[in-house]
Image: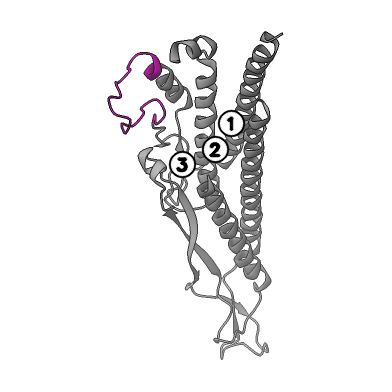
Amino acid sequence: MADIAEVLASGLSAARLRVNVLASNIANAETTRTESGGPYRRKDVVQIAKSVPASFGSTLDRMTLQKPEVAAVVEDQSDPRKVYSPGHPDADKDGFVAYPNINVVTTMTDLMSASRLYQANVTALETLRQMERDAGTLSTAM
Amino acid sequence: MKPFFDKILDSTIPGLQKTLDLTWRRHEAISSNIANAETPQYRATDLNFAGELEKAFNSSSNQNLMQTNSKHLDLKQGTAAHLTPVYSGATKQDGNNVDIDQQMGQLSFNSGKYSSAARLLRKKLGMLKFAIREGGR
């Protein structure tokens, strides 16, 4: 019973982290200089499914639930977008400025889909609570 | 003791209990799918509700395995509800085949089934209570 709340809770934190990473990508879409040098690099979430340590009952019923977990946040290693802009302080000797390889439109749609996923997890949690409440009313029947 | 209770307690109560149990498990399966809607390589899982319920009813009437020792597992209680991977539906590029809209629909349908079963069970118990109380008058 507590297992599934745990699965949904990790669903929530994975979705929240995804929203944070995508928001950081949008915010830094034009960042040409970072502390580590070079332009900002697009960050991506590596999400894995991890089996929840099974209780005896669920092992007996072959119910193994999997919870999502963020294994790593990786940086995009592809070449930055080059824009010809001589005079820009970050321009190279040929006058090109390296911009992050970020498509704001696709990142925005990914952001919306991640926030919808967060809401979906909330809805599943609310449903769980409603079902627990329904089960609780049985005690008043007798 | 048992034949007496069998007369009062028909298969409604065990049936509703099983329905509650199975819808709960189905909720777990659906929740796991929703939580993993963006996990690469995750396969959606589901539970064959109708099949499991039928199995529960048949196992309680047909195959009455003897319990010669109180430590034996009660098969009626522990009818395993297996989660099976779903192969239908489009698999995305990352190997994930969760259809989030379908899952949300199932979620609402399933929880409705759970509260209906709980309400019916409450009514049934209420009727028993009525019979017990009013019988004394």
* Place of residue B78 in the rendered image (x, y in percent of width and height, measured from the top left): 39, 31
- Marks 1 and 2 sit apart, C-alpha to C-alpha, by 7 Å
Q: Tell me which residue sits at (32%, 17%) in the image.
A: B63
CB contact under 8 Å: marks 1 and 2: yes
Q: Which amino acid does the dot numbered 2 rest on?
A: His
- Within-10-Å neighbours for mark 3: few <14, some 14–19, many 20+: many
Tag 3 subunit: B
Q: Specify whether A133 is left or right of A57.
A: right
Q: Are marks 1 and 2 on the same chain?
A: yes
Closer to us: B123 or A90 = B123
Q: Which amino acid does the dot numbered 3 rest on?
A: Ala
Q: Specify whether A118 is left or right of A49.
A: right
Task: Tell me which secondary structure the magenta stretch mostly adopts.
Answer: loop
Q: Tell me which residue sits at (62%, 88%) in the image.
A: A90
Q: How many marks?
A: 3
Q: Tell me which residue sits at (62%, 60%) in the image.
A: A16
Q: Report the magenta residues as a range.
A: B58-79
Q: Which amino acid does the dot numbered 1 rest on?
A: Asn
* Place of residue B99 in the rendered image (x, y in percent of width and height, measured from the top left): 53, 40
Vertical position of residue B43 compared to residue A41: above or below: above
Closer to us: A75 or A56 = A56
Reply yes or no: does residue B97 show up in magenta.
no
Vertical position of residue B3 compared to residue B109: above or below: above
In this view of the protein, can residue B46 be seen by the observer? yes
Where disc 2 sits, the SS reads helix
- Within-10-Å neighbours for mark 2: few <14, some 14–19, many 20+: many
